Amino acid sequence: MQSSLNSVAIFRFREKVQPLIFAKRKTRSPKAIVLFDIDSTLLNGTKVYSATLTHLIRKFNRADLTALRYLLFRRPKGFLGSPAAKNSFLAPQHYRDALFEDVLPTLQKLKGKASLGIFSQGPGRLQRAKLYLSGIESYFSPELTFIFPPRKILKAKRILAQLPKTKIYFVDDRPGIAAALANHRVKVFLIRRRSKPAPQNGGIIRIRSLKEILNFV
């Protein structure tokens, strides 16, 4: 009799056991990538140059010729090694004051949502110095920082080929650059802070503040 009861108990226990079903883990797709231009996008260059020139004249009673040549004609040869560059032009406060007011709030919120980088043109040391001196260098991945001599647009295809397969956005202030980048089938935010709002045109999204990027990424 006891054996019979045990058999019934085992049978009932087996009825209650459900097969284990393991859910397939979803593979996370890479974060979107947002590549920023520097001048007139993150940094108000005119404000930097104006503050620097004023400081040079007040401090030395004249503008250092090497610095003045760069400020007026953008000729960087020998500029970074000049005393004026170290003592005045590369003063961090000038760069922090020249950040557009929408830069820090946008970078802080984007940092956790996307991988941030730089796609800019100009002297490499100087462009990187701008990021460091303005205090925003840490927001950008070194692996996603691309700085070229003028005509950076010629490098776009090569850069895109080495980026992960994910959503890629560029942020630039020049319509010509934006149009050329859009031809590579990526989204481009064209930042025009003083322009009237305009609808999206193909791959180009016109924005008046960097904060608008948060609506898309």
Image (cartoon, rainbow, N blue to C red):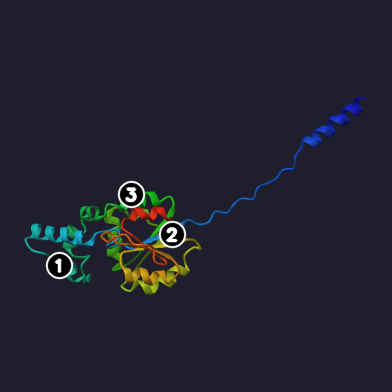
N-terminal of the two: label 1 or label 3? 1
Q: Which of marks 1 and 2 is nearer the N terminus?
A: 2
Q: Is mark 1 on a helix, strand or loop?
A: helix
List the single residue furthest toward the top.
1
Q: Residue 207 in the image: state x and y as whole percent.
A: 34, 59
Q: Describe residue 127's horizontal placement relative to residue 67 as left or right.
A: right
- Between the residue at mark 1 and the residue at mark 3, the CA separation in whole angstroms equals 33 Å
Q: Which of 212 and 105 is in front in this view?
A: 212
Alpha carbon distance from label 3 to label 2: 18 Å
Kindly indicate the quadrant of the structure image that contains residue 89.
Answer: bottom left
Q: Where is residue 53 in the image (x, y as percent from the top left)?
A: 14, 61
Q: How crowded is mark 3: few (under 14 residues within 10 Å), some or many (20 or more)?
A: few
In percent of the image, x 46 and y 57: which residue is there? 32
Residue on which disc 2 sits: 33
Q: Mark 1 points at which residue?
A: 68
* Residue bearing the label numbered 3: 105
Looking at the picture, does residue 151 appear above or below residue 109?
below
Q: Which numbered tag is attached to residue 8?
A: none
Structural distance between the alpha carbons of marks 1 and 2: 37 Å
Which quarter shows the C terminus? bottom left
Hey, what amino acid is under mark 1? Leu
Give percent across and percent down for residue 116. Answer: 40, 57
Q: Residue most toward the left?
A: 61
**Given the image, on which type of amino acid does mark 2 rest?**
Ile
Three-letter residue code for mark 3? Pro
Crowd rating for badge 1 (residues with CA inside 10 Å; few <14, some 14–19, many 20+):
some
Q: Earlier in the sequence, mark 3 or mark 2?
A: 2
